[in-house]
Image (tube, coloured by chain):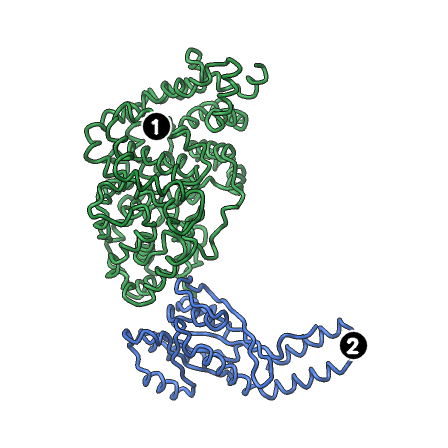
Amino acid sequence: MAKQYDVLFRLLMLGDSGVGKTCMLRRFTESEFDPSHISTIGVDFKMKTLELDGIKVRVQIWDTAGQERYQTITKQYYRRAQGIIFVYDITSESSFQHLLKWAGDVDEFAPDKVQRVLIGNKSDEELSRQVTKDQGSKLAETCGMEFFETSASTSSNISEAFTRLTELVLQAHHRDVDNLLGALDDYLDNNALEEENESEGTDVNTHRTCAC
Amino acid sequence: MAELSTLSPSPPALGDPHVAPSVPPSSSAQQAINHPVPESAMEKPSPMSSLYNDKALTGNTPAAQSGGSPLTPHPPLSPTKLTADTPLSLLVHEASPQREESPGKDAETVPDVMKQETSDPPAAERLNTETVTPAPPSEPSSAPPSEPSSAPPSEPSSAPPSEPSSAPPREPSSAPSEGPQASPSPDLNPGPNLYPNVHVTHNPNPVMDDGTFTASQPQIAAASNAMPAAAASIDSTAAVEEKLQPLQQEEIPQSLPPPPLSPKPATPSEATKAELPSTPTSAEPPSPGVPLILEPDFPFPLPKPRPAPDTLSYLESASIMSGTLESLSGLGEDGSSVGSDSEVNGMSVRRTDKYGFLGGNQYSESGEKDVRVEVARQREVKWLDMFYHWDKWVKHRFQKVKLRCRKGIPSSLRSKAWQLLSNSQELLDANPGKFEELEREPGEAKWLDIIEKDLHRQFPFHEMFAARGGHGQQDLYRILKAYTIYRPEEGYCQAQAPVAAVLLMHMPAEQAFWCLVQICEKYLPGYYTALDW
């Protein structure tokens, strides 16, 4: 069976409750915007496959509950993430300020190699803006992140932001990906393998990537 | 003959005027007669709850309408409370006495009773042809013994005087939509101004609080009046309701001919009639919400001319008042709010399913297996019996209670059942006024912020919660906030909101609050609490 993707990355979305994490994710994975969704409780995830540089990248995006109470749970997911998306709401000063705390947690719990982007969401609500674009990009700069202002509502910049983070992750894991692809080639060349072994082989390969 | 008698033994017994005082009816009649006054007093709450239920449950299920009304409001500790408001109550009386004699026979006796009530028409016909003539009169004849003592006295006595002034206005209000409005909060919510009718329903509020019922009979009349209309508008097969109509209408005209009759044929009739036939049968967009929105049925007290009241869906009416809570929640101004409402309104399916969902994941297709009316009735009777002897059931036959829970608690009785099962009823009774007290507290900003962010994110496709600042969201705010004050060390957890919302779909805010308390503290102790690992 042909694999539908070459590599799998896990991305994690963090940010205060109500900043639009779930909406962004839905917009990105399903091209839908549903203002009436439910609050995320605990953790949820959606997947999407992108093709970057000829590599089929499946991103598994973990959507976390924003309420502080859930952080004991969501922190468990930091360790296995290769990319982190910090989200704040440009109409909420406090959600922006809390980023420092979020970023601190990530520094503490996430792998060193983790790639990060900063996103100011709800850019369509210019009238209620409380955080300037400048503030956002400065913070991003300070933390060494790329910065996007997005709108899940209008779909502005959503795909760009997710794709960019995926690229960053891909670059960061380039060597592993090369190894993986090499392994895949070997594997494809090897006709002698039984089907059972085939599936095992792919599993192993995936694991190798993930375990990086 | 022989066959018939075996098939439907009880009808003749009941039906025969002379023999009428057979065991079941007589006992019920006695009870009724013994406590005529309490009954009337007790009955008053029932309309309220029925109203609430209607709204909450969207009253789609026939059971909810007929059965729910008399029962839910107050613990039917004494059978007399339930008396002849609806056929169901009659059933109850009949059934319960029997049960006392021989609990084991429940299943057997009940069905018989059921036949009389639910499958009555066919039975009656058969009987007629068979010359067992007593059958047709059975209804009327059996009814009198118990009803005269309860229903008739109550209605005529108070109804006539108050009818003209209070009852008519209440009818519109008694409809599903306003109940919710009324219940939310006199204090929190200035909303009612939109519906002058609603002011009337505020009377019910106090009613719900306790046993004190100020606005009484008219409600019953109103409720009963509303019922037929509701039945008409609601698709449901509702043989039950059809039963209701004849019975109640008979009574009402006698006591108060002009008022009940006038409202219907009056002004609204045109509009309603036009709407009603179409809505129940099909889910067409034009008047999708209508079946649920009973308020428009009696729009005549309307202050301002609204666009054909019947075309106003529950949603629309709710969204109209969405402005009222703006200050409270601070949610309204942002564009997204408009988006959400318009989104919902734009949906092709505006009609709710039987649980009140307009769409979304929770929406259940109507094709879903519906429990047969007789079965539903039977279950209700069984549950009512359990209610009467709740302590005994829980103590001695808990497995049976459990089994029945798993078969499905009749939706009309779910509110009551949940309160008993969770023991929240006890808390409620033990803490009169506590909820109001909690509501008066300001609350902590850090909790209120999060709660407000979540108000519009709970079952956004449920008619009760679809409108920003609507009564559902208001109530949700009330009970979630109250909990943070009740347990300041726990505060608010986002996962409480959906639970609270479901509770609100079934019961008034205060009851829902205590249920939530029990869930948080008894069922899931520590589950919602912050953990520091």
Q: Secondary structure at mark 2?
A: loop
Can residue B226 be seen here? The reply is: yes
The residue at which mark 1 appears reads as B248
- Same subunit, tags 1 and 2: no
Residue B421 percent location from the top left of the image: 44, 42
- The kind of residue on which mark 1 rests is Gln
Q: Quadrant of the N terminus of chain B?
A: top right
Residue B197 coordinates in the image, percent (x, y): 23, 43
Q: Amino acid at mark 2?
A: Leu
Q: CA distance from mark 1 to mark 2?
A: 80 Å
B165 to the left or right of B493: left
Residue B492 shows in this picture: no
Kindly identify the residue that appears in the image at 32 percent across and 36 percent down. B226
Picture coordinates of residue A37, whole percent (x, y): 42, 62
Residue at the top extreme, as displayed: B18
Shown in blue, the chain is: A
Q: Colour of chain B?
A: green
Q: Which mark is residue A193?
A: 2
Q: Are marks 1 and 2 in contact (CB under 8 Å)?
A: no
Query: Which disc number belongs to residue B43?
Result: none
- Badge 2 density bin: few <14, some 14–19, many ≥20, Cα 10 Å: few
Q: Which chain hosts label 2?
A: A
